[in-house]
Amino acid sequence: MTTAIPRQQTAEPAAPRMHFSALAKPAGAACNLDCTYCFFLSKELLYDEAGQRMSDHDLERFISDFLDSQPDGDVSIEWQGGEPTLRGLPFFKRAVELSEKYRRPAQDVTHSIQTNGTLITDEWADFLAENHFLVGLSIDGPAQYHDVYRVNKAGRGTQAQVLRAWEILQRHHVDTNILCTVHAGNADHPHEVYRYFRDALGAEFIQFIPIVERVTPAQRDIAEAGWHGQGEERPLYRQRGSDVTSRSVGPEQWGAFLSTIFDEWVKRDVGRVFVQLFDVTVGNAMGIYTLCTHSPTCGNAIAVLHNGDVYACDHYVEPAYLRGNIATESMRDIVASPEQRRFGMSKMTELSAQCQACDVRWACQGGCPKDRFVKTLDGRELNYLCEGYRTFFRHAQPDVAAMVSLVQSGRKACGIMDMPRDEDGRLLQPVPTAGAQGPEPTMSERSSGRPGKPKAKVKPKARAKKGGRRRR
Ligand code: SF4
Ligand code: SF4
């Protein structure tokens, strides 16, 4: 028997329903692994209590409030960690039950979960498939690259366990995409990493996320040992400092990594392998922003901790960005609050002069503010990855423009693979400049995607093959 969570009584009319994403952390920052680069492990320092777990009461409050806040249509409930599967299968069965209880008839609710895969069993996979979860599985490539930093508490590599999870998920036809972080251990091996996912695993959806671990000079030595450490010196990761750890990807490496994979993808894989950033770049060229990192503004992707605390963003789970708690405020009000709007708008208003004049701003939009810590002459801060972004977006521009032309003339983007190229692989046909295709939006409400979450859009073909998404 469940009881409805009473809504906060207020004399003010409720804010209108709005699209935003809320990344819920049912096991707090707890994880069964000790990936060396995972700064989120340090976030357990924010709370005194041991065993940070979302209670049934907070779970119900979260789901009822979130579904109440969202408009009709597709709604995605996102679970992340730490490691969310630590919260156990009964918790997620209850989450599905509650989302059925609180969804409006015109809402089509999807759950997505980002996991390290090590606890996935046949029982889990049965449940995930049955309930149409979208699963993001963290794999950093073949074992020699994955195991550099993705290690267990004994310091041993975890690739074999993750591979086992991939196989179980595939066997049960769970919609799964690969989330690959790009770091000092794999960044120089783009072909091997990409071909491993495509050919060895048969992956169709891939996200590449750059590892950038900011540190102050004082933190650096401690941080190099990883963020899981014990003892009084253990730092809470905050977005401050202009040094990076040795695990972080270099700007040049990031640009070369993306460009190399793009070259292979655009000649043979368009339409059958979906690489998030490549899709996002084509979208940006048409004025359609789907990823906050490369949208003009952000602020529509909050993080909800195990105890209901709400932070401005998953990357800003630190005291200065605590926005409230779902026990006392609706998430809709938090997202619409002046301080959160300012946070989101500052992505655009704080752009450096260099970004404002940049020829690939249409695609980059200055990147994520968390990575902007290189001082510029105008006193603002430039993205640490700027050189990589500039390299990649310039490199991709002719092909992106050609794909946009194909799409806008009613053809498929995969037609790019039939277009003639010179011996260096460059397109022979002149194409318009990407970025001039669509209007520049002035507000961010169209951007809700956030890096590091399972891809919410699954291509129709995959759904059809698996019997189709549940419709009501
Ligand atoms: S762009 Fe960065 S700071 Fe803004 S919502 Fe996205 S991840 Fe958070
Ligand atoms: S490539 Fe560099 S200068 Fe251009 S928008 Fe991105 S961060 Fe700014």
Image (tube, grey):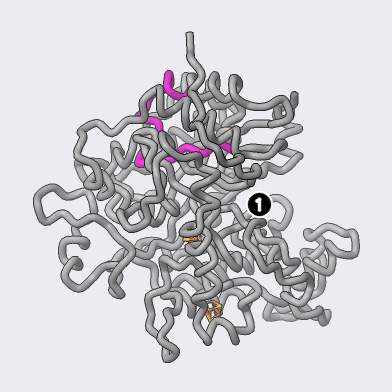
Between 13 and 279, the one nearer to me in the picture? 13
Location of residue 379 with respect to 1 vertically, above or below: below
Q: Which residues are magenta?
A: 76-92
Q: Which residue is mark 1?
A: 273
Q: Residue furthest bottom?
A: 377
Q: Tell me if mark 1 has few (under 14), some (14-19) or many (20+) residues whose alpha carbon lies within 10 angstroms of its own.
A: some
Residue 462, picture quadrant? top right
Q: Residue furthest left?
A: 232
Residue drawn at 55 percent across, 37 percent down? 11
Amino acid type indicated by mark 1:
Val
Estimate the x, y position of residue 437 in percent, counting from the top left.
Answer: 79, 72
Q: Residue furthest right?
A: 409
Residue 91, picture quadrant? top left
Q: Is residue 285 visible?
A: yes
Location of residue 57 with respect to 269 vertically, above or below: above
Estimate the x, y position of residue 24 in percent, counting from the top left.
Answer: 45, 39
Image quadrant occupied by the C terminus: top right
Q: Is the distance from the Cβ of mark 1 to the nearest ligand 1 atom less than 8 Å?
A: no
